[in-house]
């Protein structure tokens, strides 16, 4: 394969473009309508991958870091604090540094990678999230997670006195009134900047005769997992390997099966975490939908794997 069109301009799209162009495949980028992008947490494994792909070991040197995570999860539970190590970065700022590395082509494409503009997806939940800018009482590189009867809050504090507050299940002001852990950290809360789905979703099928889906066009995760960037990179590595291998039908089936397995693991993690969160109608509804998702993924589970990833190459399993 000599040329590929990539629809999208996020992390997964960039990673696909980088890996393909590094192997001599021309890439054309079809950029979607610009949209506001959030801050993201990039954990250490994802940082290492991005630094390696970009050829820049200092890519995250000057970004604020989260060094501690405090969790208050479950009715009456005492807050627990853990060491943490993630970079906090505005996704658009990161992409603005990455995309100039990609040589873009205008050749007719033989194949398309769809990494934006999702088709209708399977939904396993109904929860939505909103994001508010907040002013903090103190400057610290930390994050906090707290559960309530009607949802949960996730506060990310950077290197200065500003932060981002994600509220799921109810508006942030409503949840903050019951907060024992997060509310004392906040001095002021700004208006919420719109809503987005916070429940797991997956596309099925993920490919056809001349395209495959990747990144958020293939599946979206609950932001509680904290590894959305890592998932996007791993999907892109596998997608690029499939394309470089000729996008044979068996490879495409392997790709979709691998992503479904990752989605199944994410659903199981969410289910276990939500069971421990609280009890009540809101939690019961979301747990039931996660159980539906697990039933679906396990009904579509693959048998024996026919390929394995060796480096960045997809090869037949022995």
Image (spheres, rainbow, N blue to C red):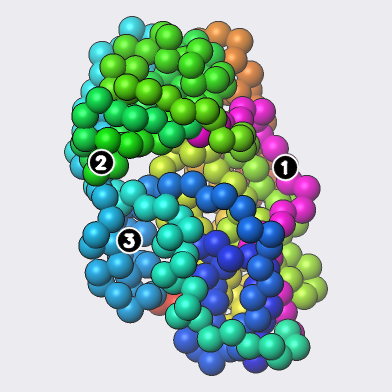
Q: Is residue 198 magenta?
A: no
- Mark 2 neighbour class, 10 Å CA radius: few under 14, some 14 to 19, many 20 or more: few
In what element is the residue under mark 2?
loop
Query: Is residue 282 placed above or below 88 in the rendered structure?
Result: above
Give the number of marks: 3
Please name the residue that numbered disc 1 is placed on.
122
Q: Earlier in the sequence, mark 1 or mark 3?
A: 3
Please name the residue that numbered disc 2 is placed on.
160
Tell me if 129 is positioned left or right of 66 in this view: right
The residue stretch that appears in magenta? 110-131
Please name the residue that numbered disc 3 is placed on.
47
Q: Name the residue at 63% across, 58% down.
A: 34
Q: Is residue 199 visible?
A: no
Q: Earlier in the sequence, mark 3 or mark 2?
A: 3
In what element is the residue under mark 3?
helix
Q: Position of residue 214 (x, y in %)?
A: 61, 62
Tell me if 75 is positioned left or right of 67 in this view: right
Q: Position of residue 8 (x, y in %)?
A: 63, 65
Instruction: Look at discs 1 and 3 and give the one toward the viewer.
Output: 3
- Mark 3 neighbour class, 10 Å CA radius: few under 14, some 14 to 19, many 20 or more: many
Instruction: Look at discs 3 and 2 and give the one toward the viewer.
Output: 2
Q: Which quadrant of the view contains residue 46?
A: bottom left
Marks 2,1: beta carbons within 8 A: no
Q: Name the residue at 50% across, 81% down.
A: 102
In what element is the residue under mark 1?
strand
* Spatial CA span between label 3 and label 2: 21 Å
Q: Nearer the viewer, residue 154 or 38?
A: 38
Q: Quadrant of the N terminus?
A: bottom right
Marks 1,3: beta carbons within 8 A: no
- Mark 1 neighbour class, 10 Å CA radius: few under 14, some 14 to 19, many 20 or more: some
Q: Is residue 121 magenta?
A: yes
């Amino acid at each position: 394969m000599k040329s590929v069109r990539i629809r999208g301009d996020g992390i997964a799209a960039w990673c696909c473009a980088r890996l393909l162009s590094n192997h001599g495949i021309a890439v054309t980028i079809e950029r979607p309508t610009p949209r506001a992008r959030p801050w993201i947490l990039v954990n250490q494994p994802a940082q290492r991958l991005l630094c390696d792909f970009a050829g820049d070991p200092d890519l995250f040197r000057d970004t604020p870091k989260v060094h501690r995570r405090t969790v208050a999860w479950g009715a009456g539970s005492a807050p627990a604090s853990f060491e943490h190590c993630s970079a906090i970065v505005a996704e658009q700022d990161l992409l603005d540094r990455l995309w100039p590395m990609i040589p873009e082509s205008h050749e007719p494409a033989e194949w398309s990678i769809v990494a934006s503009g999702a088709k209708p997806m399977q939904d396993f939940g109904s929860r939505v999230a909103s994001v508010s800018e907040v002013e903090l009482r103190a400057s610290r590189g930390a994050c906090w997670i707290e559960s309530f009867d009607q949802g949960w809050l996730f506060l990310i504090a950077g290197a200065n006195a500003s932060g981002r507050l994600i509220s799921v299940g109810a508006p942030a002001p409503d949840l903050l009134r019951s907060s024992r852990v997060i509310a004392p950290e906040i001095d002021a809360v700004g208006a919420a900047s719109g809503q987005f789905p916070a429940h797991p979703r997956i596309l099925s099928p993920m490919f056809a005769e001349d395209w495959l889906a990747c990144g958020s066009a293939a599946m979206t995760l609950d932001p509680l997992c904290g590894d959305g960037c890592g998932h996007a990179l791993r999907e892109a590595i596998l997608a690029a390997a499939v394309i470089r291998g000729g996008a044979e039908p068996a490879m495409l089936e392997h790709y979709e099966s691998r992503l479904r397995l990752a989605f199944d693991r994410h659903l199981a993690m969410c289910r276990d975490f939500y069971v421990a969160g609280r009890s009540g109608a809101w939690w019961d509804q979301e747990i039931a939908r996660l159980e539906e998702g697990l039933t679906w993924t396990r009904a579509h589970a693959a048998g024996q794997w026919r390929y394995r990833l060796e480096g960045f190459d997809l090869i037949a399993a022995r």
